[in-house]
Amino acid sequence: MSTVLQSIIEGVLEDVKRREVPLSQLRDRLSEAPSLRGALAALEAAGTQVISEVKRSSPSKGALAEIPSPAKLAQSYEKGGAAVVSVLTEERRFKGSITDFNEVRSAIEIPLLRKDFIVTEFQVLESRIIGADLILLIVAGLSQSQYSDFYQMSSELGMDILVEVHNHEELERALDLNPKIIGVNSRNLKTLDLDFRVFDELLPLIPKGILKVAESGISTRDEVEHIEALGGKAILVGETLVKSGDPEHAIGRLLGRTHKSTEQTGTL
């Protein structure tokens, strides 16, 4: 596990401990959980799909955008044609919160991804209770037994799972469970540098029948076209959208609905 990732997870565990309650109490609340919206089905719709991210900050870039109203930003994503909205709930490095997630869920009708570092059973149950349609499991941050347990639990709770990988070894581990969605992240968790060659190396290796998502650093239509040629079905985009000033237009640009001359450089 990378030093950066380890540091993030240590912070997540401290934050979880502050709000943790007995798992039995969480299980009792599952009956109150909102109906799920079907993230996988939304991503399987015709054409390339966008997972648009509500993201204030990142370890690699620092502050990205203030986002005074996550709900309004999410509404612009929905209007722009996003299939899923991702909401950061990690507090320390990404300045997210469950409050952000709740506000967004109340404001839109499309599915939501809870974007966090899921490393405890508590977080899995918590995700279902707040209405996460899609949950992120980062292979690099989990033992194989944790990955298996959290994947099974999330599935039993009805949530779809985005399994994130960064290299060949992680992809092999991910495939042990035959997941329905795999995300390839071009962000190196040791250096935080981007390397788009990871898309070229890993996306073609993901078996047919598994939905492929490209994550991090995507900012131009040319990049999206390259990902499409590699078999990518969806892209997860954060910084490019939150800094665009016009998220609806930015989504359209990435999907080829507007002219390439309007493109601007950005990274996740």
Image (tube, helix red, strand yellow):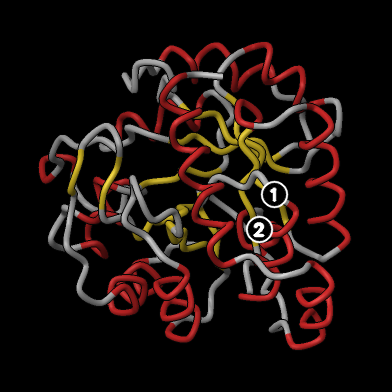
How far across and down, in percent of the image, does residue 222 sit?
Answer: 30, 30
Indicate which disc residue 17 carries: none
Q: Quick one: quadrant of the N terminus? A: top right
Residue appearing at x 11%, y 46% in the figure: 262
Judging by the rendered image, the residue that carries numbered circle 2 is 123
What amino acid type is highlighted by mark number 1? Thr
Which quarter of the figure has residue 21?
A: bottom right
Q: Is residue 245 above or below residue 75?
A: above
Q: Residue at x 26, y 46 (%)?
A: 239
Q: Where is residue 188 drawn, in percent x and y?
A: 42, 19
Give 204 or 193, whichever is nearer the viewer. Answer: 193
Q: Residue at x 63, y 74 (%)?
A: 131
Is 257 on the left-hand or right-hand side of 215? left
Asked which secondary structure carries label 2, the reply is: helix
Question: Nearest the camera: 116 or 240?
Answer: 116
Separation of marks 1 and 2 at Cα, in angstroms: 5 Å
Residue ID for mark 1 = 120
Query: Tags 1 and 2 in contact by the CB under 8 Å rule?
Result: yes
Q: Nearer the viewer, residue 232 or 92?
A: 92
Judging depth in this view, the residue of 125 and 185 nearest the camera is 125
**Is 236 situated above or below 167?**
below
User: In the image, is residue 30 above or below residue 149?
Assistant: below
Name which residue type carries label 2: Gln
**Is 202 on the left-hand or right-hand side of 262?**
right
Label 2 Cα neighbours within 10 Å, binned few <14 / some 14-19 / many ≥20 = some
Q: Is residue 268 left or right of residue 9?
A: left
